[in-house]
Image: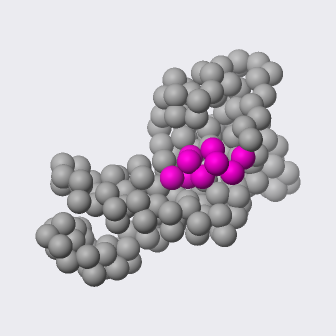
Amino acid sequence: MPDKLSSYIEQFQEGNHLIFEKIYQAISPKMFGVCLRYAADKDEAKDILQESFIKIYHQLKTFRHEGSFEGWAKRIVVNTALEYYRSKTKWKHVTINNHEETFDLESDDDILGYLSSQEILQLIQELPPSYRLVFNLYVFEGLKHREIAEQLGIGEGTSKSNLADARRILQKKLLGVTK
């Protein structure tokens, strides 16, 4: 598929904008998964996905084939999700402490073994928006707290606190599910 996808992108950049449907079909399932992590539910995820693909369509002429197209598109999707929450919510950041929790979603195989990816996604979607955004940016996008703070317009300590709180909430929910 990557060869076909590259061909579709080149055709689009040469002026065949009807081929965009093929590009959409090729990457939208994966990008929808990204949207689901940031959204509170499927309807929000669909809104974010639609807005993201409008941006991808308009910015595709600037893609320079210097890296992964999916990575380039994912960055647009993540930024669109962040913009969505900036416009839809009034940010409430609670900084209670600056300590890091020891809970690690990625390495606690015993707990995660009991849950499907859909159940894990649902637990993430239930997090308050500011916690969910910080959690996703840190865990899935690999950003540092300094970068998250810049992206969201919050303090680095708030980013750390929101991540710790998100992990604590997820840990409680996960332990409640598996008992």
Of residues 8 and 62, the one nearer the viewer is: 62
Of residues 90 and 117, the one nearer the viewer is: 90
Q: How are the colours assigned in the image?
A: one colour
Residue 65 is a magenta residue: no
Question: Who's the residue at 78% across and 28% down the image?
Answer: 94
84 vs 131, left or right, is left
Question: Who's the residue at 46% across and 71% down the image?
Answer: 29
Residue 84 is a magenta residue: yes
Predominant secondary structure, magenta span: helix
Q: How many marks?
A: 0
Question: Who's the residue at 74% across and 31% down the image?
Answer: 93
Asked whether the viewer can see residue 48, the reply is yes
52 vs 17, left or right, is right
Q: Give the quadrant of the C terminus.
A: bottom right
Question: Who's the residue at 58% across and 69% down the image?
Answer: 46
Residue 178: x %, y % from top left: 80, 55
Q: Give the quadrant of the N terminus.
A: bottom left
Residue 87: x %, y % from top left: 64, 48
Asked if residue 41 is positioned above or below residue 17 in the image, the reply reads: above
Of residues 34 and 102, the one nearer the viewer is: 34
76 vs 167, left or right, is left
Of residues 24 and 106, the one nearer the viewer is: 24
- Magenta extent: 80-89
Asked whether the viewer can see residue 114, the reply is no
Residue 5: x %, y % from top left: 24, 71
Residue 172: x %, y % from top left: 82, 43
